[in-house]
Image: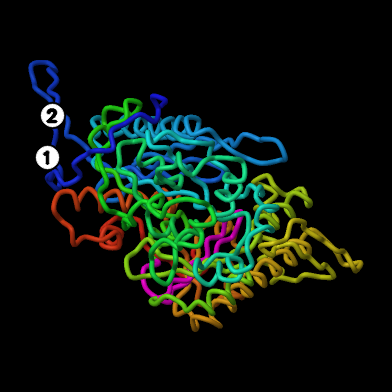
Amino acid sequence: MSELYRKSFDIDVHHPVQWPPRAAERPREQRGGAVVGFATTEAVVGIDVGSTEIKALVADLSGVTLSVRRTATDWHRCAGGGSELPVDALLDRVLSALSGAVRVAEESARRLTVVGVAITGMAESGVLLDRNRDPLHPVIAWFDQRGVEELALLPDELVDSFSGHTGLPLSPLCSFAKLNWLAAQGISPHLTEKWLNVPELVAAALGGEAVTEPSLASRTGLLDQGTRGPWEPAFQQLGLPTSALPPLTTAGTPIGRVDHPGVPDAVRGAVITVAGHDHPVASVASGVWHGEHLFDSCGTSEAVLRVVSAPLRDDQRRRLTANGVAQGAHVLPDRWILLGGTRGGLLLDRVLALLGRQDQRARAELDEQALASHGSTGSVVISGAHARSEDVSVQLVGSDVTPLTTWSAALDHAMAETDAVIELMSAEAGPHEHVTAAGGWTRMRSFRAAKQRSLPAVEYARVDQPSAYGAALFAAQAARSAAGETGVSAVDIARQFSGNTLTTAGVQL
């Protein structure tokens, strides 16, 4: 086992700590005969292990962000066009982001003590561990398409029942498809002890127990959404014992303390928790807490998340998954989510590139022109924002085509695809009651205007880096839970943290 991954899994997570934590002994400095004391700043860290970047965010206990550090995930390309990353390399990147963020925070805080660390990030990706807790293979990226041929060979009975039980489309994206491919490559199930999703893997490497967080388990294809237990047909197909899926452990639950040799001194001993899947974690940071609330994460891949207060039936799950909408557990207890998406952000980025408007000045100029034109699209037809689309199509069918009309047409098409996903969700779960949007595209005023035409009641979250910030909320919850405050939720923390408020449509960030 590598030094990056070596750790003890037998840590007493019930040892209480004081909350607020005791102020560490203050260093005393002699200056001209006077003794000067420096107070300790207690903080929490949220780590977001994303598909493109790994981010570490340090916040103090009032919710003020002290620092954010990023490093590229930097997948390795492999034969057949796949993407994977050795576990040691992944953990090295996480430690780099964590150390950098803590170092910057220490520069402003003088003396820093981290009391809680939480990890969120991508779902569908993870590793099988052997009985020595060593990884049996690299982390395969969730978007890697390997396993398509093996899915075609699955028994009809399993194929027919998969989506109704698991809440997922049967596609190469889910963990089951990757595990099925690994089994076909000869990885013996007799060697396997546990499956850990990426955020759970990082938490275990830092010093936590091996657990499964429900929102991440919901993306594996191994969990029965109706019973919240292992779906046995999947395990039978893979030849794995159901014990390979660790116990379900709610986000924000303390699972150990940081003891990895590669972390900064300020982080040692901090309580660890798994925050869960990045999309619902970001929604919590953005003020989306209650049933029937809709969250629109407007990034490169637009994620549409609908909170529901009761799980769906198998037949509802089958209908939704047939159209690319999944159902699973929320990171908050007694909540479920419907999760769909579009490639709207990717389409808009490519249209800006086509128009030569990617630099900040040119983009801002186009943004202002689009606002003044009231969304005139001219004779431009655009497609390619559907979740299953691979290509963007721009058809110029008239003489009145300009960069402005092309951009307006792209905005309208992106909104239409999002509306279609929302309609699918509403058909099964009823209409949503509130809608909140967040993400990089919401910084463009023309995007906001188009979104408001589509969803008139939309509000915008005033929070930067919502996934990493959301993880910090769960880190604070875990630290307080370890101190004996078991009734405090991540939502309670979010209400207390500063800067986590909503603004009405049209207010510029």
Q: Nearer the viewer, mark 2 or mark 1?
A: 1
Snapshot quadrant of residue 186:
top right
Task: Report if residue 206 is visible in the image.
Answer: yes
75 or 453: nearer the viewer: 75
Q: Secondary structure at mark 1?
A: loop
What quarter of the picture does the N terminus occupy? top left
At 9% from the left and 22% from the top, the residue drawn is: 35
316 or 419: nearer the viewer: 316
Number of labelled discs? Answer: 2
Please state if 504 lies on the left or on the right of 264 as rendered: right
Q: Position of residue 453 (x, y in %)?
A: 61, 75
- Real-space Cα distance between discs 2 and 1? 11 Å
Please state if 222 lies on the left or on the right of 499 as rendered: right
Q: Which residue is the site of mark 1?
A: 22
Q: In the drawing, what numbered circle is on residue 26?
A: 2
303 or 82: nearer the viewer: 82
Q: In the drawing, what numbered circle is on residue 1?
A: none
Q: Position of residue 108 (x, y in %)?
A: 31, 33
Q: Say if 280 sits above or below 504 in the image.
A: above
The type of residue carrying mark 1 is: Arg
Please state if 137 lies on the left or on the right of 283 as rendered: right
Task: Report if residue 449 is visible in the image.
Answer: no
Snapshot quadrant of residue 129:
top left
At 42% from the left and 25% from the top, the residue drawn is: 2
Q: Position of residue 404 (x, y in %)?
A: 76, 61
The type of residue carrying mark 2 is: Arg
Q: Position of residue 176 (x, y in %)?
A: 54, 54
